[in-house]
Image (spheres, helix red, strand yellow):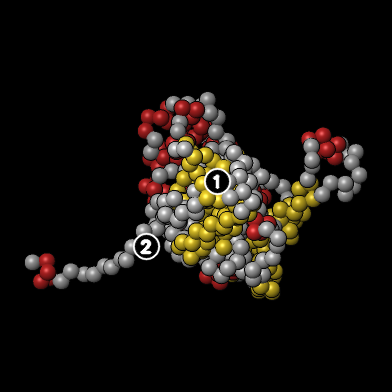
Amino acid sequence: MDQIAIKVKDISKIYKLYHKPSERLFDALGLAKKGRFPEHRALDHVSFEVKKGETVGIIGTNGSGKSTILKIITGVLSPTEGEVEIEGRISALLELGAGFNMEYTGIENVYLNGMMMGFTREEMDARMDEILRFADIGEFVNQPCRTYSSGMFVRLAFAVSINIDPEILIVDEALSVGDVFFQAKCYKKFEDFKAQGKTIIFVSHDISSVAKYCDRVILLNRGVKLSEGRPKETIDLYKKVLLNQSQNIANGQVLESAGKAGGKLWKDHYELNPDVNEYGTGEAEIIDFAIVDEYGSYTNCIQKGTVFEIRSKVLFRNDVPDPIFTYTFKTVQGTAVTGTNTMYERVGVGLARAGEVYVATFRQEMNLQGGEYLLSVSCTGYVGGEFRAYHRLYDVVGVTVISDKNTVGFYDMNSETTVRRETREESL
């Protein structure tokens, strides 16, 4: 019988939702009536096992419970119901550097983290050269961590976590830290762990990495385990969830197709950013917008390589000459990646009169890398040579790009690639 490294048995995590801090205190003192506060189930009776030497991926949309289940496995959180059994020493790459003291030097923090993981100073001495070699931050290891760049900080934190010889490795999106060369080193270490027969739980939005490294994949959605099985079948089901092609899914089966979702407004189909940066002169108003996939469905999850549309509906309050409709994609860190507008595309409108409604549609192929992005839309223009922003919605909605093949950087050049062996005659 295969030995079990991790057994998750009927785990649920329930959070009570409070409107203000005083309600939390009131409830903690036992003064609140039972059932007064609504509850949110971050996890709902989730069970699975991970065998020793197995690499298991956990995938799902944002808010599906992936990070919550990892925090329960590592002991950061306690479950509301159920239990977890662990056989082996765990190293968790979750919140890198969470235990670092910013006033301590890098070296001091290495020892501090080692002690927190249960290692003696002598044991950390034996690992120090490898940790410093892997982090590769030079003389900065002798400086306080408050002087580090964010890149140096995560490199050192990652190096500490990855070089303590764990029996079980828990990874939550941590392989994407640092520059492309450091990421390559991280993935090489990950492959070494797998070759050594270590037990690995891997959470990532990088579906290509999940498919490449994992023996088995678990799909979570809204705290419920939807499916568990071989990577290809589970990832295919995940794509259906992300592309909004299914309304109800249970036991890995699509029960009812959502098709083109109904609703009075396009934007009602999306979870909008509650902190959207909105401003403008008020002479025009973006009254609706949409992201539409290749199937004609309203969704904010687009498969890389497919054609999709961005639509923006604008009501003009005043007469506006030559309005410009725009969209922009940003990374979650705020870097503008791509975008365009009707002026760049040489699509003129002329005079938009008060009371008129215009719909701008941008149709294109999705060539961004797989990951999370933020969409901004706006209506702008020029009056007497001066720029005017009539209405802008910055970072109004998140967009997930699903990909099973990523290249370097933000977008894919879609290179036609060939490799052939040169003949002996050609080399002479």
Q: Quadrant of the C terminus?
A: bottom left
Q: Is mark 2 on a helix, strand or loop?
A: loop
- Report the residue at 57% width, 57% height from top: 359
Neighbour tally class for label 2: few under 14, some 14-19, many 20 plus, Cα within 10 Å: few
Q: Left of 266 or right of it: where is 156?
A: left
**Residue 304 in picture, x, y percent from top left:** 47, 62
Identify the residue at image location x=10%, y=71%: 425
Horizontal side, residue 335 vs residue 70: left or right = left
Q: Which mark is residue 414?
A: 2
198 or 381, which is in the foreground?
381
Q: Quadrant of the N terminus?
A: bottom right
Type of residue at label 2? Asn
Q: In this view, does 336 lie above or below 52?
A: above
Point out which mark residue 148 bears: none
Circle 1 SS class: strand
The answer to whether 72 appears left or right of 341 in the picture is right
Q: Which amino acid does label 1 sit on?
A: Val
Name the residue carrying label 1. Answer: 320
- Please name the residue shown 52% across and 59% down the image: 361
The residue drawn where x is 52% and y is 50% is: 351
Could you classify mark 1 by the number of other residues whose Cα lies within 10 Å: few (under 14), some (14-19), or many (20 or more)?
Answer: many
